[in-house]
Image: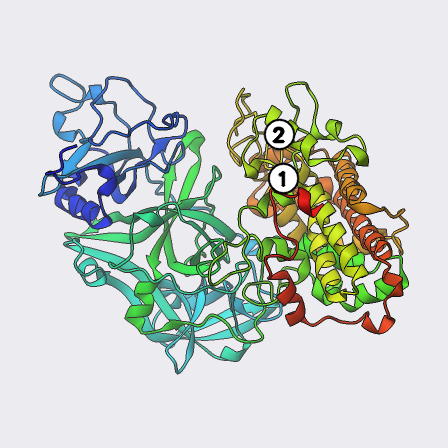
């Protein structure tokens, strides 16, 4: 090592370095044939390129030019990996191979885009060329029946309409902000219009006046004013934000529709904005497109030049997976939030969407990207703060409906009268009254009390920090699943290795996992052992007369039994077929999670379909459930664990995971996003009712079994009453309450 030279490796380049390199070379780039735009970010690597072997050194300087012709690098076939270099991204409308440039070649050397450019101090900056031809034609008009309206009260994330020159314009009201005196709705300036413009929305089918456009609004700002000390000559940052002075601020719910209560603002500036944000998972709700899940793809995308000045968008946001980000006109004004298992950062508002860019992809497909402005800039320039919550706000939390449904309905089918009285009394602690379970369930957030049936997801899956000492991210996750249908080298599955309750053992499962090469904690699902652990704890709590602890354990057990009655939770096909590509081609080595054929089925079936048909599902379940459950009880945790294995088998027999995968893959190709839940419900709705009814019965049976094994009938009836939220929260937030353990460490708790 040369200790007297500075480190000039690509990995040490800062965001400011990339901006300086681009600013210095941008005029040259934009005058080259086919170049349509630039951004800064991390190097895109073709998804088909192999990962480097562990321990390999990445080159510290640019790799030598090769004559190997590679397929065009596109936004569709490439990805950011953990070793991707900082770089300047150059978007081109046509891909050209290196050998086509030069004397007597098809293209002049002056049009060649170099692999590297240099800063004034001699440091090299990589250039990543990406084929991204812009699509200029307008998308089809938005169908009125696709616009999503709130229920009950107006809420952030809902549509707002303005009548302009005889036509109705649509935007999304992204969030609420305040200047300390008034509360405003934040939306798109090009829809909000001039001060005094009247905007409306619709609630429960009725038109509601939102308010009028404020004088507080932003159009564009010089880059060097927004990001002082960073290079950006002759550049404007497009912002396009207007505020709406709310007519009745008390009527508005500050939580964002289908996203939830906002976390603290992601306060980003020249002091802390860095390339670390590339790849950050983000979510939003647009009134035109519904709930959106994306990732930050690049920063400072330069998208047009007018009169000697260029325009940039702070964020270029793309899809989170292989499916395009289907954002549409009408989503302008929505707020993107960063998603994290760190409670202090979860749902932190990051950016305001004001537009989009659409690039051409293979097979004439379209790849939409969102263009968004740093929300910190908006708040700073308009001198406002986020208005995040009020005491009586309700919070949408997707994905919880199924768990809450099973927890609520099981309370009513318990066999023992005293226990049934206890569970009915605490139904609103375990879950909600069934009539209240819909897309707007209340108070499902942390910090604060979370109804017990979703504590494992909403509380224990968070990272443990000073702000969230209850977090158990990591060891908690494998408790929710078990791939019981994957065959080992001898052709046997976990089902085969567990033919009876007596055969259920951690050793047998660990031996199986070793035989298939699943050695990481995250690969070793242990759902039945988690049920075994909780069942044993419930009997101990009952025997000790600890009714509150029993209710807390019984409530969280609802989550795991709910997992077991969903066919994908106990299958290696949990999110698609890993032995087929998204195109359906067979592969010998399994693809990464969420990259196989029909990926997205887990979310599409267990979350979106269940949420969209919650009302019908609950009514059908109430008709299907006997009262009491009529199942024979079990004795001991081993039998309890085996009971959920049998439940999982019945679920997979009723709805074969491969059938779900095949159906979803077909639906992806033939149905618009708004129609996918209906297509799944038409095919699997009745069977889903059957599997969830089975889950309700098994849950109630396990409650009954533990209650009697611990001699619950001897507990004085005066103790069978409502347990306070604070008491229950104090129980489940302790690390020693039903501790989350990996397969190799759970035996002492069984």
In the image, 699 versus 117, the foreground residue is 699
On the image, the x and y values in percent for residue 363 come to: 44, 29
Q: Is residue 672 above or below residue 387?
A: above
Label 1: state its secondary structure.
helix
Real-space CA distance between mark 1 and mark 2, rounded to the nearest whole angstrom = 10 Å
Is mark 1 in CB contact (under 8 Å) with mark 2?
yes
Q: Dividing the image into 4 quarters, which one contains the C terminus?
A: top right
On the image, the x and y values in percent for residue 563 come to: 68, 46
Residue situated furthest bottom in the rendering: 181
Q: Is residue 693 left or right of residue 150?
A: right
Which residue corresponds to the image point at 81% horizontal and 55% vertical from the top-left? 703
Q: Is residue 378 left or right of residue 432?
A: left
Which image quarter: residue 119? top left
Instruction: Point out which mark residue 175 bears.
Output: none
Sequence order check, earlier mark of 1 and 2 = 2
Label 2: state its secondary structure.
helix
For label 2, the residue is 513
Q: Dividing the image into 4 quarters, which one contains the N terminus?
A: top left
For label 1, the residue is 743
On the image, the x and y values in percent for residue 737 come to: 65, 57
In the image, 65 versus 480, the foreground residue is 480
Residue situated furthest front in the rendering: 748
On the image, the x and y values in percent for residue 213 come to: 39, 74
- Disc 1 packing (10 Å; few <14; some 14–19; many ≥20): many
Which residue corresponds to the image point at 56% horizontal and 72% vertical from the top-left? 393
């Amino acid at each position: 090592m040369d200790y007297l030279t500075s480190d000039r490796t690509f990995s040490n380049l800062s965001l400011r370095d990339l901006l300086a390199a681009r600013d210095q070379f941008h005029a040259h780039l934009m005058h080259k044939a086919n170049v349509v735009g630039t951004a800064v970010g991390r190097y895109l690597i073709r998804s088909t390129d192999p990962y480097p072997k562990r321990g390999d050194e990445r080159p510290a300087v640019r790799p030598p030019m090769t004559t190997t012709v590679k397929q065009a690098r596109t936004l569709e076939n490439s990805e950011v990996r953990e070793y991707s270099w900082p770089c300047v991204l150059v978007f081109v409308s046509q891909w050209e191979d290196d050998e086509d440039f030069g004397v007597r070649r098809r293209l002049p050397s002056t049009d060649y885009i170099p692999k590297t450019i240099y800063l004034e101090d001699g440091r090299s900056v990589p250039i990543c060329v990406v084929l991204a031809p812009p699509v200029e034609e307008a998308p089809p008009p938005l169908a009125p029946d696709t616009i999503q309206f709130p229920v009950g009260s107006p809420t952030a994330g809902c549509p707002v309409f303005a009548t302009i020159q005889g036509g109705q314009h649509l935007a999304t009201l992204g969030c609420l902000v305040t200047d300390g005196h008034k509360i405003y709705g934040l939306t798109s300036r090009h829809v909000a219009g001039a001060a005094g413009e009247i905007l409306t929305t619709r609630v429960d089918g009725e038109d509601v006046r939102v308010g009028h456009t404020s004088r507080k609004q932003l159009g564009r700002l010089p880059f060097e004013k927004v990001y002082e000390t960073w290079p950006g000559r002759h550049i404007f940052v497009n912002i396009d934000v207007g505020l709406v002075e709310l007519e009745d601020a008390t009527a508005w719910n500050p939580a964002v529709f289908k996203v939830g209560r906002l976390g603290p603002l992601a306060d980003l500036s020249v002091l802390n904005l860095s390339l670390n944000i590339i790849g950050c998972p983000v979510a939003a709700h647009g009134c035109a497109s519904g709930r959106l899940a994306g990732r930050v793809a690049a920063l400072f995308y330069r998208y047009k030049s007018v009169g000697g000045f260029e325009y940039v968008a702070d964020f270029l946001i793309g899809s989170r997976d292989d499916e395009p980000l289907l954002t549409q006109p009408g989503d302008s004004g929505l707020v993107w939030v960063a998603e994290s298992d760190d409670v202090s950062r979860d749902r932190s508002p990051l950016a305001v969407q004001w537009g989009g860019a659409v690039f051409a992809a293979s097979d004439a497909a379209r790849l939409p990207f969102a263009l968004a402005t740093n929300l910190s800039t908006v708040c700073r320039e308009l001198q406002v703060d986020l208005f995040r919550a009020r005491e009586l706000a309700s919070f949408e939390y997707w994905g919880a409906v199924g768990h809450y449904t099973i927890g609520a309905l099981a309370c009513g089918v318990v066999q023992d009268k005293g226990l049934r009285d206890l569970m009915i009394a605490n139904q609103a602690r375990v879950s909600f009254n069934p009539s209240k379970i819909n897309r707007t369930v209340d108070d499902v957030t942390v910090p604060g009390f979370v109804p017990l049936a979703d504590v494992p997801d909403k509380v224990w899956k968070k990272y443990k920090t000073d702000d969230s000492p209850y977090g158990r991210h990591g060891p908690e996750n494998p408790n929710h699943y078990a791939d019981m249908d994957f065959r080992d080298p001898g052709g046997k599955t976990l089902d085969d290795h567990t033919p009876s309750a007596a055969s259920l053992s951690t050793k047998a499962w660990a031996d199986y996992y070793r035989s298939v090469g699943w050695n990481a904690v995250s690969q070793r699902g242990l759902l039945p052992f988690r049920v075994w652990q909780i069942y044993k704890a419930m009997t101990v709590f009952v025997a000790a007369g600890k009714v509150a602890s029993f209710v807390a354990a019984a409530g969280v057990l609802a989550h795991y039994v709910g997992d077991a009655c969903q066919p994908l939770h106990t299958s290696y096909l949990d999110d698609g077929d890993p032995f087929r590509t998204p195109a359906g081609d067979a592969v010998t080595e399994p693809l990464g999670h969420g990259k196989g054929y029909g990926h997205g089925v887990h979310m599409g079936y267990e979350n979106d379909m269940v949420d969209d048909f919650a009302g019908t599902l609950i009514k059908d379940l109430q008709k299907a459930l006997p009262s009491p459950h009529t199942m024979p009880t079990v004795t001991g945790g081993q039998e309890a664990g085996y009971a959920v294995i049998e439940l999982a088998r019945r679920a997979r027999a009723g709805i074969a995971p491969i059938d779900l995968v095949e159906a979803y893959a077909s639906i992806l190709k033939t149905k618009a996003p708004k129609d996918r839940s209906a297509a799944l419900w038409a095919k699997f709705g009745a069977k889903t009712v059957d599997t969830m009814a089975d889950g309700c019965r098994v849950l109630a049976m396990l409650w009954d079994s533990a209650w009697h094994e611990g001699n619950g009938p001897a507990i004085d009836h005066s103790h069978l009453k409502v347990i306070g939220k604070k008491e229950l929260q104090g129980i489940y937030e302790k690390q020693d309450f039903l501790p989350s353990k990996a397969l190799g460490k759970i035996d002492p708790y069984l």
